[in-house]
Image (cartoon, rainbow, N blue to C red):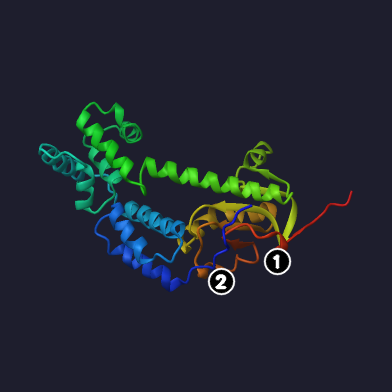
Amino acid sequence: MLSQIESKPMPYKLYLAIVDDFNKLTSFSRKAENMIRKKYKDIPSTTIGSIISMLVQRSMKLSYRKSPVISSRYYDLYENLIKKEDKSEVIIQLADSQGISPALFIRSLLQNVHTDSTMVKKCLKDSTIIENKDLAYQVFLGIMHDNQYGPYADIIKQSIGLEYELRLEQELKAMNITFSDESILRLRGYDKTPDFKLDVPIAIDGFVVNWIESKALFGDEENHLGYLKEQLICYWNRFGPGLVIYWFGYLETLENTSEVNSMFILRTKFPSKDTITQYKIDM
């Protein structure tokens, strides 16, 4: 059984303060990230880490422009710095100076090396295919250093997502709650599926739950609205009301939306056994 304690929704003012401090950062280095973590040390590490990761992703989407001029400038900066005696962490230094993540700097720089975007993606995932050994090494360092953006960060997020799905599955099995997972539902012809469709509904504090969606991240208004449009309304239309678990917390304002407590309920962990009623099917 999980020992994680159910956390209260985050006050909106606290969230805005974190966003404001993030927006004041001049770089996306781990040092800058740790400064925010230190300031908000009372917030669980997973929660503040998820918020920072989310804000970095959004910032990079706004910052990224596929421009030959920018790519050429980044490459010139790299060429000038790599000629110096100290070649350690060249790309990391340059990304810091430009106020973007190392992975995004690398993406732009590689676009000056390869005109084929497919090749750029391959180099991001596997630096060993880059012919220039110095560039290959610097790309590797930059990608591995960037734990918020790029292929390395994507793998981390995927792994964490799978870990929490497995934890939830173990919780359900421990309580003898039977379910069908995504793979089974897809075999039945469903295109959009929750993580777990309960074979028999349960009631959590009197609210009927037919399905459960696991989100190993922090839920704020922007990403919750995206999930609502792309997933949650579809689940409700198809299977009825359900449960959404934001393992790393969520904003208190989400509980004031019309969908919560009508289409689904929100939690930060799977509820304890004493809050759950399991229905039985008469044979």
Q: Quadrant of residue 41?
A: bottom left
| Residue position for label 2 | 256
Residue 18 visible to the viewer:
yes
145 or 15, which is in the foreground? 145
Where is residue 187 shown, x and y percent of the image?
66, 36
Q: How many marks?
A: 2
Report the side of 154 relative to 231 (left or right).
left
- Residue at screen point 68% across, 50% down: 172
* Residue 114 visible, this angle: no
Nearer to me, 60 or 24: 24
Neighbour tally class for label 1: few under 14, some 14-19, many 20 plus, Cα within 10 Å = few
Q: Quadrant of residue 257?
A: bottom right
> From the viewer's perspective, is 54 left or right of 25?
right
Query: Quick one: which residue is furthest to the bottom in this view?
Result: 13
Q: Residues within 10 Å of mark 2 (few under 14, many from 20)?
A: few
| Residue 43 in picture, x, y percent from top left | 44, 64
Q: Residue at x 65, y 65 (%)?
A: 262
Q: Amino acid at mark 2?
A: Asn
Q: Of circles 2 and 1, which is in front?
A: 1
Residue that appears at 26% across and 51% down: 100
Which comes sooner in the sequence, label 2 or label 1?
A: 1
In the rendered structure, which amino acid carries the disc numbered 1?
A: Asp
**C-alpha gap between disc 2 and disc 1:** 18 Å
Expressed as whole percent of the image width and height from the top left, the position of residue 267 reads: 59, 61
The secondary structure type at the circle numbered 2 is helix
Q: Residue at x 61, y 47 (%)?
A: 195
Q: Which mark is residue 95?
A: none
Q: Which residue is mark 1?
A: 205
State whether residue 80 is above or below residue 21.
Answer: above
